[in-house]
């Protein structure tokens, strides 16, 4: 079974969700109305040692990344982060580790001007769970389900670097292209904040958004299936960094971009009628790239030659009995 099947079968079920009148499971964050003018969005992300990051990872980088990936879901909703809670499970006490971890966490929190407001600390295998909440004007959050045929598909940053960096996370052998490797690793550990760019895209009537955590195609597929539309992607326009191109072949780089996870850029759809505003916004935020269009071809993602693209990406999987 994979994670999505488990959620559907056991948790997004009537017995667990029937009391809920407002927020449906399945988007990057849950949405709650709190006043006449504002909604709250809430997301939770867990990082497990040996699964999401290697044993003996830099504590400072880990602190930063743990919060950054949770904030990424808030950006994907078009919201502004407000505060966070942290569940921390530690196998042992190392004051040096805790100093560095808390510093990395604080760097990310300060960058977003948000505070840690609670959590839980336990003993066990190293695991960090962060719940972040954010604010968005009532009814304005960017859902996965809002894409319409004809919308422009945008991506807010280069793809593939973080997935490719996994090859170098634990590599100790020297590589003569260390500069490029360092750039890839930076993308993995310090995902760039997408909060500002998502606000700007929401302001030009974005219809849907998701953050790329599991790979471009798998995450675009969430938009396509929940919006009941299709997509045509121009593979040649997918932004890939010079660093990645210098380390692997063009074909491999494209595979990382399409199927690799951990990028934490956003896929955002914009109505065709806002094309001009989008072009203007791209002058201010050149990292925004137009990579395709939403089609009415239900649930199908094709390339510029109309060839269906195989949809896969990162998934947690278990053998069930
Ligand atoms: P993301 O990649 O945006 O963090 P996930 O793929 O982890 O989202 O989760 C997909 C959806 O399923 C989200 O809406 C999430 O809140 C929900 N979800 C994940 N795990 C559970 C669970 N154990 N119980 C209820 N809902 C869950
Ligand atoms: Mg997400």
Image (tube, grey):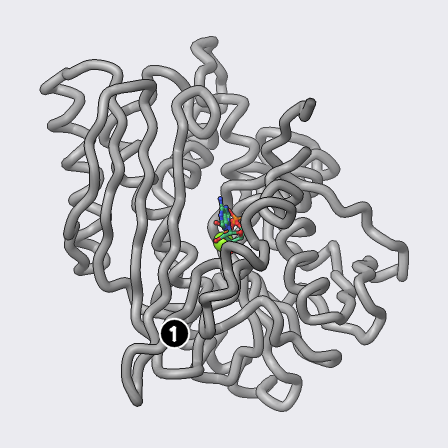
Dot 1 falls on a residue whose secondary structure is helix
The residue that appears at 56% across and 32% down in the rendered structure is 164
**Few, some or many C-alpha atoms within 10 Å of disc 1 (few <14, some 14-19, many ≥20)?**
some
Tell me if residue 307 comes above or below residue 134 in the rendering: above
Q: Nearer the viewer, residue 66 or 198?
A: 66
The residue that appears at 60% across and 73% down in the rendered structure is 269
Tell me if residue 16 comes above or below residue 9 in the rendering: below
Whether residue 115 sits left or right of residue 25 in the image: it is left
Residue 285 appears anywhere in the view:
no
Residue 36: quarter of image: bottom left
Residue 87 in percent (x, y) is at 26, 37
**Quadrant showing the N terminus:** top right
Tell me if residue 113 comes above or below residue 262 in the rendering: below
For the image, the number of numbered tags is 1
In the picture of the structure, the residue carrying the numbered disc 1 is: 199
Residue 175 in percent (x, y) is at 49, 16
**Quadrant showing the C terminus:** top right
Whether residue 211 sits left or right of residue 284 in the image: it is right
Whether residue 85 sits left or right of residue 200 in the image: it is left
Q: Nearer the viewer, residue 34 or 13?
A: 13
Q: Is the residue marked 1 within 8 Å of ligand 2, measured from its CB?
A: no
Outermost residue on the top side: it is 173
Whether residue 315 sits left or right of residue 82 in the image: it is right
Residue 305: quarter of image: bottom right
The residue that appears at 19% across and 31% down in the rendered structure is 121
Q: Nearer the viewer, residue 28 or 76?
A: 28
Q: Nearer the viewer, residue 285 or 16?
A: 16
Residue 27 in percent (x, y) is at 52, 61
Residue 115 in percent (x, y) is at 15, 55
The residue that appears at 35% across and 54% down in the rendered structure is 71
Residue 249: quarter of image: top right
Residue 84 appears anywhere in the view:
yes
């Amino acid at each position: 079974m994979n994670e999505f099947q488990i959620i559907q079968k056991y948790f997004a079920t009537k017995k667990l969700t029937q009391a809920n009148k407002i927020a449906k499971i399945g988007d990057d964050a849950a949405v709650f109305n709190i006043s006449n003018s504002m909604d709250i969005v809430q997301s939770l992300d867990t990082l497990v040692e040996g699964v999401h990051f290697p044993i003996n990872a830099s504590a400072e980088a880990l602190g930063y990344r743990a919060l950054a990936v949770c904030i990424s879901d808030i950006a994907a909703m078009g919201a502004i982060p407000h505060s966070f809670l942290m569940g921390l499970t530690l196998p042992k006490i190392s004051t040096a580790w805790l100093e560095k971890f808390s510093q990395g966490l604080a760097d990310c929190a300060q960058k977003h001007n948000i505070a840690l407001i609670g959590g839980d600390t336990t003993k066990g295998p190293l695991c960090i769970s962060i719940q972040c909440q954010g604010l968005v004007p009532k009814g304005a959050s960017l859902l996965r389900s809002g894409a319409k045929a004809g919308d422009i598909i945008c991506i807010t940053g280069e793809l593939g670097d973080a997935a490719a960096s996994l090859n170098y996370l634990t590599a100790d052998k020297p590589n003569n292209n260390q500069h490029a490797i360092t750039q890839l690793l930076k993308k993995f550990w310090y995902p760039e904040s997408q909060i500002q760019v998502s606000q700007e895209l929401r302001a030009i009537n974005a219809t849907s958004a998701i953050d790329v955590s599991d790979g471009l195609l798998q995450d675009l597929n969430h938009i396509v299936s929940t919006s009941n539309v299709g997509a045509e992607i121009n593979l040649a326009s997918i932004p890939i960094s010079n660093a990645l191109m210098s380390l692997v072949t063009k074909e491999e780089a494209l595979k990382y971009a399409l199927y690799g996870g951990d990028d934490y850029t956003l896929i955002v759809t914009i109505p065709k009628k806002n094309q001009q505003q989008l072009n203007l916004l791209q002058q201010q935020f050149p990292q925004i790239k137009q990579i395709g269009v939403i089609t009415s071809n239900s649930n199908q993602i094709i390339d510029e030659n109309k060839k269906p693209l195989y949809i896969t990406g990162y998934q947690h999987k278990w053998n069930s009995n």
